[in-house]
Image (tube, helix red, strand yellow):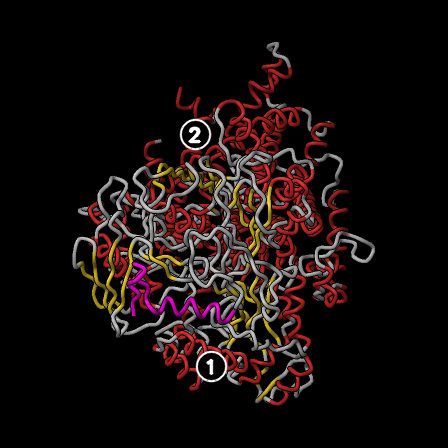
Amino acid sequence: MTRYIARRLAFAVPTLAGIVVLVFALLHLAPGSPVSALGEGSGRRVSQQAAHEMQRLYGLDRPLPERFARWISRVARLDFGESFVDHRPVLARIGEALPYTLVLNGLALLLTLAIAVPLGVAAGGRPEGSLDRASSAILFALYSLPAFWAALLLQTLFSVKLRWLPLYGVASDLPEGGAAGFLDRASHLVLPVLCLTYGSLAFFARLIRSSVAETRNADYVLAARARGLSRRQALWKHAFRNALIPLVTLLGLVLPGLLSGSVIIERIFAWPGLGRLYFDSILSRDYPVILALSLLGAVSTLVLTLVADIASAVADPRVRDGSIS
Amino acid sequence: MNEAAAAGFPAGRAGSSARSRPGRLSRSARGALAVVAFLWVVAAVSPLFSARAAEIRLNDRLLAPSRAHPFGTDDLGRDLLARVIAATPISLAIGTTAAAVSVLIGFSVGATAGWFGGMVDLVLSRLVEVVLCFPVLFLLLALAAFLPPSPLTVIFAIGLTTWPGDARFARAEILKTRDLDYTRAARSAGASTPRILVRHLLPVAAPPLLVSAAFGVGWAILAEAALSFLGVGLPPPMASWGGILAVAPAYIEDAWWIALFPGLALFATVSAYNLLAAGLREATTEKSVNR
Amino acid sequence: MANPRKGVLLASIAASLAAGIFLSSGCRDKPDRAPSASTRSATPRPAAVAAPLGFLDESGLAPAGEGGTLRRRLSGDPATLNAVMQSGLPEQEVLQYVSRNLLDLDSQMKVVPGLARFTVSPDGRTFLFTLRDDAVWEDGTPVRAADAVFTIRSIVDPKIPSPVFRSVFDGLLSVYATGEKTFTVRFRETYAYRSMSFVLPLLPERRFAKKHFLSAPDNRAPFSNGPYRFVSWKPQQEIVLERNPRAWGERGHFDRIVFRILPEDSVAYRSLLAGNLEETRLDSTGKGRAAQDPEFAACCRLVEYFDLGWNYIALNNRSPLFADARVRRALTMLLDRAAIVRNLFQGSARILSGPWAPDSAVYDATVSPLRFDPAGAASLLDAAGWRDSNGNGVRDRGGREFAFDLLVSTGTTAGRQIDETFAAELARAGIRATIRPVEWAAFSERVDAGDFEAASLAWSASDPNPDPYPFWHSSQWPPHGLNSEFYKNADADRLMEEARAEQDESRRTAIYHRLHRIFRDDAPVIFVATSSQKFGFSRRVRGLVTSPLGMFGIWPGPLGWWPAGEEGGPAARPPSSPSPVLR
């Protein structure tokens, strides 16, 4: 096991290096600069001389390899530098946006699992039953539904026509304490959480369903029933446990996306999370922030995939039993 | 781009319906095929509507659906129905081509890695990982900034970011088959590598690749719409469903029809392709089991 | 040059500039700044300007209320609250309350004393400033000449980004203190509009001593020398200010100012209706919605005015397509600006004939814009040699088709709508324009480098400086300056040079009027329109003043607003004269 992990970690190094070099190169070769990104909306034009001075100030007049060396040597000391936009530490800006993304995506993931697990087990317990067929049709439709369109429709219906829910934002403009404030914040979460949930719902529910369906007639499940467990108990205790392995693997694939935030959903709902920070940073060419977010995204993907692989190895009864005996 | 959807298509073997006979498409898949065929017919006749779709009438801005404009008009007074029709060939062509590009790259890389193994596999697998872990949106935005916005750019951008899924898949398929008896036999008979790959391994890998490509079309159409929605897709006035949708948020309180109709077309198309893909997968898995 | 009698040392430039404003537009009824005047009502503009909107001035009403909280909207989080490093509108709107400027611009676009008075040497290159005796920071220590010197040196320090102020100090020779309250600023050359450079807030020197300038704590919590002082800033949420107990000079009428950061227009609109906000900007759609909304009418009023901003479509005059003035004129004649004003801007816009907004002091209203005339444009294009020789529907000349890319910055709805309308009209005339949306960073880089054929742009002005030299003089072609269109006209060059050095306002205006005609006929760009700025204001706030500089960046501007009390309360008073913008 240790050797396996070490091997995987060793492989992660060139992958990370590749990503970092690519992002850095693309970023600095792409047209536009932090200086040319200034003044959007204000229409002000920075004089050419002032623009040159600012380029020098940000070190953009140095050759690319030199800039890369400087950046990477700072990152090695876990120093991501300061944002070009407000000159605050990059980590402070990320730290500000992270909780928003975590709340939104965490709730969406919980909701997904809360629906997908019972639904998947129930549908898998009786393949081709009416529940299975109905749920599979609905899940299929949801899978094909573009999230940004669903967001627009939900906004039109619930915010514009019915006025039940806020259109976007984190809270009404007067943040209140207590129950009223909590309800207000919760109401702002409803639509974005829905939009994030329904897409991944199909993945999870179908996965659990097929895994349960496969094993519901396996020997050990039948044996459990012979020992006197009800059908429901047998399904949950044994068949579902079998579904945990692919579930953990899928979680490993999905979690990094949850961390980095959904750019489109955060944009439509004006949610100040990491996805929006990323998008805004690209538009303002805030190189230190873009680089840090890309690096964090890549690292979390690699690490979580690895963790998922290890977890599924541990969860696998064959592996586990083998290690016990 | 729903990040979760980027991971591929719904996991798990699709509805293992006992009723569908092997080698034949299920009823729903045949229905989906009919929808896809209808869409291509619409695409074929769409040039008839392109003049109407481009006609700007500032006096008729943001009209609600009526007899004259069944889908209403957009923010420049263009007929929305005509625009949705005119967008059909663009969305279909981009989706199909981008999916083909993705499968082509993915298959080449995956097959090469799987066939040669060793160092080649190691390096190519890292490449796949780099692209998988690469921030997709950033790549798309960077590409859009580098290249002038055009259908080709969009195809390139989508194809370049979606192939790793196909590559992993192709690699696994090749790994499975390369040590099978008939492959060994062909090799010992002196067949060249490309010849074996094309003559012996491609036929085995083709059906799943087709399925993957069909799912890819749906995904690519979605991705194009999302890109245009973010403003980095096709240049105006070229209509694409996502491009029409892009103006919807600005008028969400005044003109719901701008959000509804192009989205419906998008949803119908993506559903049809996905259903078709699921049907294809079902049919081909049954077939391979029977063999 | 100075006028010491009133104790107000105003440079002749500023005074004559103000006179010019009244000469050209003739609509502002007060020839002098009179803070004590009790009534100042709006006068309709002359018919030549044909403004559908009035000029709102409630500053003459006696403030009927004091205290309470004013809740304003910011459309984005400020990047910094460091006066020198500010780069956008949100920063300026907050800093205005806590930092007094050396000089201010009033609603008549005149330069008036702020923290300081000044005299200027006869050659116009040396400025002598005297700070007010009573000016103090929030801890009671005096504002000193050293603070001003430190601020200006920071602006020109290449290690400090100062996108707003760096450009206006380009010709700085030296700045030094001559006493506790006096300092001198010297420039390389005379410049008619130099005094506007000093509409400049100050930084307290000692609070930046021994600190890294870019990351000093004061950048997030500014130290006040104004009527209000900083209390708190919750990123992406709100910024709170309160009365500065050590304030000197004019004071505001509210106890607290709360800026709510609300990026989305419709969220802000809802807050306004709910009574949680006192003002918000509206777009054209929002204005239409508000006009029909009884809820809005019950609590709020619409304030609409024209400022000095305008839209245009830049043409690269070096491109073989646009080198011929006849072609550029033809393109202008192919843009149906009347229909755009009527439909896209719903009437609240004005067509332009030159590179200034109609409210600019130098705009010559007798220069009529080119008319929408497709037939006339066709014959101009024919005359310039652009004919459809191969019958493919696109004009060509010497084997080159008349086809070009029209850049537009993504995210500007108005720009894209104008461009699509324009491209459709051009197609009918046998010209193929392909619209290329480019995001701002890349867009502005290409425009500044002159690397484009045509581009859709908006101009905005925060001061009344009409000097066309940096943008239209042939010495300012990229990469040296901002004449990105590569416009060149020897006559225009000469006139621009003359105007820059001309100290007499009326003579300068006469030069600009001649230039205006040249610009109209040369059509270096397609001048499109200036559209109105629209705001929803709670009826609880009175004392508003609009000006071509907007209603925020002027003195006293928002500091002159006062609370009208609750509806029906004794404090509520009708305005002395109904203004056309009150609906």
Asked which secondary structure carries label 2, the reply is helix
Answer whether residue C426 is visible to the viewer in this image. Answer: yes
Spot occupied by residue A48 in the image (x, y as percentages of width and height): 35, 68
- Identify the residue at image location x=26%, y=74%: C123
Name the foreground residue: B185 vs B252: B252
Find the residue positioned furthest to the front.
Answer: C5
- Horizontal side of residue C115 vs B96, given as left or right: left
Q: Taken as a whole, is the magenta stretch helix, strand or loop?
A: helix
Look at the picture and state if A193 lies above or below C101.
above
Mark 1 — residue? C318
Spot occupied by residue B144 in the image (x, y as percentages of width and height): 50, 60
Asked which secondary structure carries label 1, the reply is loop
Rendered image quadrant of residue B5: top right
Type of the residue with mark 1:
Arg
Spot occupied by residue A101 in the image (x, y as percentages of width and height): 47, 37
Give residue A311's mark.
2
- Horizontal side of residue C334 vs C460, given as left or right: right
In reply to whether residue C3 is colored magenta, the answer given is yes
Answer whether residue B273 is visible to the viewer in this image. Answer: no
Name the foreground residue: A173 vs A155: A173
Please tell me if label 1 and label 2 are on a single chain: no
Rendered image quadrant of residue A68: bottom left
Spot occupied by residue B50 in the image (x, y as percentages of width and height): 72, 66
- Horizontal side of residue A324 vs C263, given as left or right: left
Q: Which residues are magenta?
A: C1-25
